[in-house]
Every structure is written in structure tokens, then in C-alpha cells.
Amino acid sequence: MVLATVGGMSSSPADLVRAFHHAFGLDARSVPTEVSPELAAHRGELLAEEAAEVAEVSVTGPLDRLAHELADVVYVAYGTALVHGIDLDEVIAEIHRSNMTKLGPDGRVSRRADGKVLKGDHYEAPDVAGVLRGQGWTPGTPVAGGTPDA
């Protein structure tokens, strides 16, 4: 992940969002954890709200507003990961590893008519559960409490 500069120091998006959560007293877990259905639903609503804003502005513009709304989606996604105790940077790295296997050994790319890259014969699915286990997640652990936040 590209590092951002804040106050002369470099920080990942995860660090920036963690600082926001700590400053505002919002949930921030350090180990992957299931959360209450209410908190999970609230985080989903926040993500849907931001994604709808991206969808709207991607058609109507302008570009600076699109950039703003895209960043809001990422910010809320990182916040949702933090609420669940997920190191999203590690998950993104695993998704990237998997996505790169869509490229065939001969360098060929299979695309859908609209340009979307498709999974080929050499595609390897991401092992997100393995990444989460590496972060300390134990499937079936009790749900953590929490209150809705931004």
C-alpha cells in the first residue's frame, strides 16, 4: 500500500484510520473477531452509503469529487476492517497474489467483453482464512460487543 505523509511522517491507510478511531473513541480491535450483528450491519450501511456516492459521482463527476468519494470508501473499508480486528493490508496482499495468477504462464489474459479480467486455468483462489488465522483469528470465537460508529 502506498504510504501517505501526515505531519512529515509516513503512514499506511490502516495507521491513519486507526488514529481516527482512537481519537474518536471508536472500536479498534487488534485480533480478527466477529462483532455483534448490529455493529456489522451498521458498518455495512456505512460502506453501502459511500459506495452509492461513488456510483453517483462516477457518472456525473467532477474528478476531484470522485477522488474524494473513492477515498471515503477506502477509509470506511479500513475502519470496518479495524472494527473486526483485520489487518486489511495483509488481506489485500493475498488478494493481489491471487489476482496475479489470472495471468497465464504464457502472459495471456482472458477478458470478458466489457474488459473485466477473468480467472484462467492457472488461477489460485486467495487464502483469506489463512491470512486471518495468521493474524490470530480462531474460527467460531465468540462475538465481541461494540457500538455503531463512523
Image (spheres, rainbow, N blue to C red):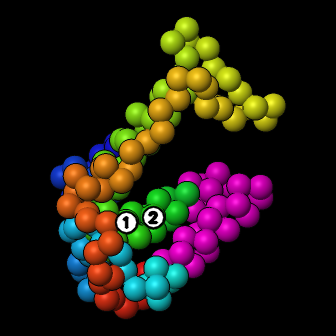
Looking at the image, do the residues carrying marks 1 and 2 touch, with CB atoms under 8 Å apart?
A: yes
How many neighbours does mark 2 have within 10 angstroms: few (below 14), some (14-19), or many (20 or more)? many
Could you say whether the residue bearing mark 2 is in a helix, strand or loop? helix
- Alpha carbons under labels 1 and 2: distance apart: 6 Å
Q: Is residue 61 left or right of residue 64?
A: right
Between residue 26 and residue 108, name the one nearer to us. 108
Residue labelled with disc 1: 81
Q: Residue type at mark 2: give it.
A: Ala
Q: Quadrant of the N terminus?
A: top left
From the viewer's perspective, is residue 75 above or below residue 117?
A: below
Which image quadrant for residue 76? bottom left
Name the foreground residue: 84 vs 67. 84
| Range drawn in magenta | 43-69
At which x and y percent is residue 105? 51, 12
Count of picture labels: 2
Which residue is depicted at the point 20% across and 61% down?
Answer: 136
* Residue at (68% x, 23% y) in the render: 110
Q: Is residue 42 visible?
A: yes
Residue at image coords 47%, 89%:
38
Q: Residue at x 61, y 74 (%)?
A: 49
- Left or right of 64 on screen, residue 14: left
Question: Which residue is under mark 2?
Answer: 77
Occupied quadrant, residue 51: bottom right
Q: Quadrant of the C terminus?
A: bottom left
- Looking at the rendered structure, the secondary structure element under dot 1 is helix
